[in-house]
Amino acid sequence: MKLLRDTTEQKSLFNFSYRDLIELDSDVWLYLDLFDSLNFSDFESVYSTKGQVPIDPNLMMRTIFYGLTHGVVSGWKLESVCRNDNRFIVLSGNCRPDKRTFHRFIERHSENIEKMFVQVVELAVEMGLVNLGRVAIDGSRFKGNTSTSHSMKYGKMVWAIDHIENELKVLRKNLLHLQRSPGVLNTGKNPRLHYVTLLGYVVFFL
């Protein structure tokens, strides 16, 4: 199926790619590896071969998940970072999804999204990761009683899944609010920010 794919590995005229702008120790690389190991066939099967070409679900999922684990739970902010933050530009494959795209994706794939979030956290725990962004999962090995360490890790994992799902609810509610607000979602601009051009200068005012 035809999808909008990741283009951030392609070199520009200045012989660099967006990925070259990401620090080597950034957790972006971890998220890329995590989501590249997952199967998105259930997501892709929902799309039609007609109409607008959709963005690869892998790109959408890793962008949303990275945002939820790094405090980005606003439609406005999520759209903004996909245009201005190199981490999110790479995660979204430089497709630069807007608020409406995120809203449609989450509403269309809500059931599959929650299932995949569980898979991601479980995979991270198996890899021994201590956290995903700001969310502690503590998959590290505990000394002492094996059953105790297993219970502690399971408890952390359940808490992490619940936390991420709650953050998703916040984002979903925010996107729904923007969708229902006349003249807000369709403009692509912050409704509080306006500008005029005077003698070649752009003057911003609230």
Image (tube, rainbow, N blue to C red):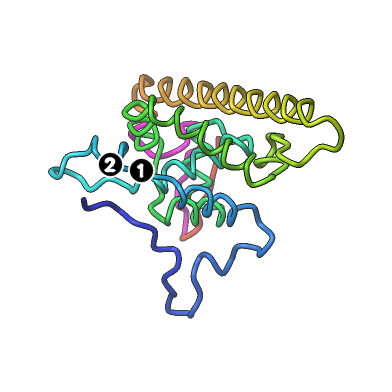
Estimate how packed mark 2 is, as few (under 14), some (14 to 19) or many (20 or more) residues with alpha carbons within 10 Å.
some
In this view, the residue farthest toward the front is 146
| Left-right relation of 85 to 55 | right
What element does badge 2 sit on?
A: helix
Is residue 14 depicted above or below 152 in this figure? Answer: below
Q: Closer to the camera, 18 or 77?
A: 18
Mark 2 touches mark 1? (CB < 8 Å): yes
Residue 138 percent coordinates (x, y): 73, 37
Question: Against 102, is 148 above or below?
Answer: above
Q: Is residue 203 left or right of residue 44?
A: right
Q: What secondary structure is marked by label 1?
A: loop
Q: CA distance from mark 2 to mark 1?
A: 6 Å
Q: Which residue is mark 2?
A: 44
| Residue 194 is one of the magenta-drawn residues | yes
Residue 12, image x and y in percent? 43, 74
Q: In this figure, which residue is indicated by the disc labeled 1? A: 40
Boundaries of the magenta span: 185-199
Q: Nearer the viewer, residue 161 or 7?
A: 161
Residue 105 picture location, percent across and down: 35, 34
